[in-house]
Image (cartoon, rainbow, N blue to C red):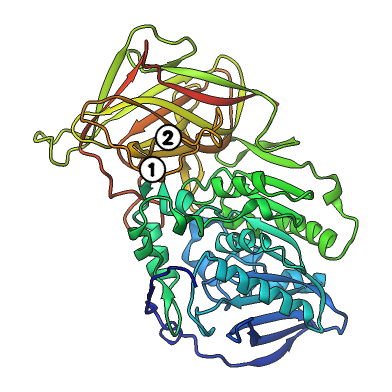
């Protein structure tokens, strides 16, 4: 067991209306339903599963859904009814689908068993719970081997699911479990520090504590105190390294689905997962819609079925003709078109450098020769007695030709915190139409007013790993702090998460830099927020001469 902190769970299953375990077996039509099936792990601990399988005696492959939210049904009740803006339609999901997991009413008639599991220590399963851990991955591997030995299973097991149900796939696939035959990670982070708990080194202060303190801790014994651990580990260290997937060990066939719309949670990690896994048989699909709705759509399930028919049943399917990379290029909202490529990151196209002209508030192609600076008020805390409105830096670029920007972006910025020794920088890329009106996109699973892309960086975390950084994607170790003197200008490289957007000739790309979250939603709405900033007073941005600040874009000719 690793160096974990443990606390009593916030809720017991009974408080949420879940008694058990209560083993049962029923038949509904041609589907056998077995509840609270005990699965023994390597140390004798018992965890519990619900199994949905065809009533015929012929063995079938199995799909494992592994997540901490409860093996009982959750998609219909939780997503459809509690989050109507998420776009999941009631007709697209049956009553037995585990939250963010596969729907037995779809898969069982197609000749698959669906196994919904409560991991160690959550809900009624025995033991002490850890999350996103090597121990959990070993438990998952034990479960895969148990499933493969059951008389109703053909010996081939696949995994599918969204978010945590995708994250665990990265972890267990790295163990090369003998009977794990295929994975379908559908928008799941792979680096807990960079993609969830700390964005650019800035602590996430709403969804992370909500998730760790309210969504995870349901059980009967002890659960890992992820939130308390994150307070003890503000820098990337061995603790966080153990919470990141060993992606290079993965060789199992993989159908990886990401989106441009989940900045602050899943976009980066899913794309990093595809890029780094070493599976010879791997495919990437990047859509522009809301993640939950897209997972349960009939056309999405048809592609999932084609993938698993190929690798769990050995059938010839359309998968053999899929492009290796398929990306949706957004025009506005959910409008756009699909493009096919051979690689991710995309090797076609070019990088384009646009310099910040602070005098005119523009992005320009030629580097300014004279140094200009502009400041904005990042926060009034402790320094601004006049309580002036908080500010931002805005620079625009109007495209002369139609282009498609597909991939990450990098902002190289000279900046000086004028009133303190550190700064939290928030970056947004937006699109304006030919009339100067803001164009928005789906965002964070349930919003429709999202940007093209977002980026974050704490100034003291500006150190780069030169071996892992590229022209378009800086990589920050986040393993130390380097404060500055008030007024001292330093260069930072901010990672702007990947996106795929079409700009017509005459449309405008807008760059925004400020000292607070750029997307704002009412309190209580699920979102990634960063309210514990180090900002005090003003941020000065410089450009020109020896202080060239610029934005690097991934530019492809329009399809």
Can you say whether 268 is above or below 439 in the image?
Answer: below
Q: Which dot marks residue 428?
A: 2
Residue 437 locus on image (x, y percent): 44, 28
Give the residue at the far top of this rendering: 369
Residue sitting at x 45%, y 28%: 411
Quarter-wise, where is residue 367 in the image?
Answer: top left
Q: Look at the image and tell me whether residue 556 can be seen.
A: yes
Q: CA distance from mark 1 to mark 2?
A: 9 Å
Q: Secondary structure at mark 1?
A: loop
Residue at the image position 88 percent from the left and 80 percent from the top:
58
Given contact means CB atoms under 8 Å apart, are the residues at marks 1 and 2 in contact?
yes
- Judge whether residue 75 can be spotted in this image: no
Q: Is residue 28 left or right of residue 336?
A: right
Rendering coords of residue 162 (x, y %):
60, 60
Residue 352 point in image, percent of width and height = 56, 20
Residue 214 placement: quadrant: bottom left
In the image, what residue occupies the spot 62% across and 49% down?
Answer: 273
Which element carries disc 2, helix, strand or loop?
Answer: strand
Q: Which residue is mark 1?
A: 519
């Amino acid at each position: 067991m690793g160096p974990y902190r443990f606390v009593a769970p916030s809720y017991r299953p009974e408080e949420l209306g879940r008694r058990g375990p209560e083993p049962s077996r029923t038949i509904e039509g041609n589907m056998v339903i077995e509840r609270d099936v005990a699965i023994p792990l390597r140390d004798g601990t018992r965890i519990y599963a619900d199994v949905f399988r065809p009533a015929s005696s012929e063995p079938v492959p199995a799909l494992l859904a592994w997540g901490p939210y409860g093996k009982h049904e959750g998609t219909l009740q939780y997503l459809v009814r509690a989050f109507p803006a998420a776009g999941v339609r009631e007709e697209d999901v049956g009553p037995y689908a585990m939250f963010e997991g596969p729907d037995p009413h779809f898969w069982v008639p197609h000749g698959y068993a669906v196994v919904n599991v409560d991991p160690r220590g959550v809900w009624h399963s025995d033991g002490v719970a850890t999350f996103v851990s090597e121990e959990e991955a070993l438990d998952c591997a034990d479960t895969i081997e148990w499933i493969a030995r059951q008389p109703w299973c053909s010996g081939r097991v696949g995994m599918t699911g969204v978010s945590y149900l995708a994250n665990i796939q990265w972890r267990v696939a790295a163990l090369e479990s003998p009977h794990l035959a295929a994975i379908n990670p559908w928008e799941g982070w792979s680096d807990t520090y960079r993609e969830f708990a700390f964005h650019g080194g800035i602590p996430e202060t709403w969804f992370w504590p909500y998730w760790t303190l309210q969504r995870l801790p349901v059980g009967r014994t002890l659960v890992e105190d992820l939130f308390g651990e994150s307070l003890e580990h503000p820098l990337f260290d061995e603790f966080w390294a153990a919470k990141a997937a060993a992606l290079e060990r993965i060789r199992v066939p993989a159908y990886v689905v990401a989106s441009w719309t989940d900045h602050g949670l899943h976009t980066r990690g899913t794309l990093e997962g595809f890029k780094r896994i070493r599976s010879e048989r791997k495919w990437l699909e990047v859509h522009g819609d809301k993640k939950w709705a897209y997972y349960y759509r009939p056309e999405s399930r048809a592609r999932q079925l084609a993938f698993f028919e190929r690798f769990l049943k050995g059938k010839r399917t359309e998968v053999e003709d899929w492009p290796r990379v398929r990306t949706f290029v957004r025009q506005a909202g959910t409008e756009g078109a699909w493009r096919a490529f051979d690689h991710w990151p995309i090797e076609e196209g070019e990088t384009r450098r646009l310099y910040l002209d602070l005098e005119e508030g523009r992005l320009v192609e030629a580097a300014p020769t004279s140094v200009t600076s502009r400041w904005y008020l990042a926060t009034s805390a402790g320094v601004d007695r006049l309580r002036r409105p908080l500010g931002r830096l805005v620079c625009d670029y109007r495209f002369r030709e139609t282009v498609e920007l597909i991939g990450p972006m990098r902002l190289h910025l000279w900046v000086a915190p004028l009133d303190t020794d550190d700064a939290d920088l928030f970056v947004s890329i937006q699109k304006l139409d030919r009339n100067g009106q803001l164009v928005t996109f789906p965002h964070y699973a349930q919003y429709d007013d999202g940007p093209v892309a977002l980026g974050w960086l704490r100034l003291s975390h500006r150190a780069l790993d030169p071996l892992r950084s590229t022209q378009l994607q800086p990589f920050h170790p986040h393993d130390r702090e380097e404060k500055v003197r008030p007024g001292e200008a330093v260069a930072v490289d901010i990672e702007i998460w990947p996106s795929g957007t079409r700009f017509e000739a005459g449309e405008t790309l807008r760059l925004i830099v400020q000292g607070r979250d750029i997307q704002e939603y009412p309190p209580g709405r699920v979102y990634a927020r960063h309210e514990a900033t180090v900002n005090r007073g003003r941020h000065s941005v410089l450009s020109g001469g020896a202080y060239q600040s610029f934005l690097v874009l991934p530019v492809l000719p329009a399809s």
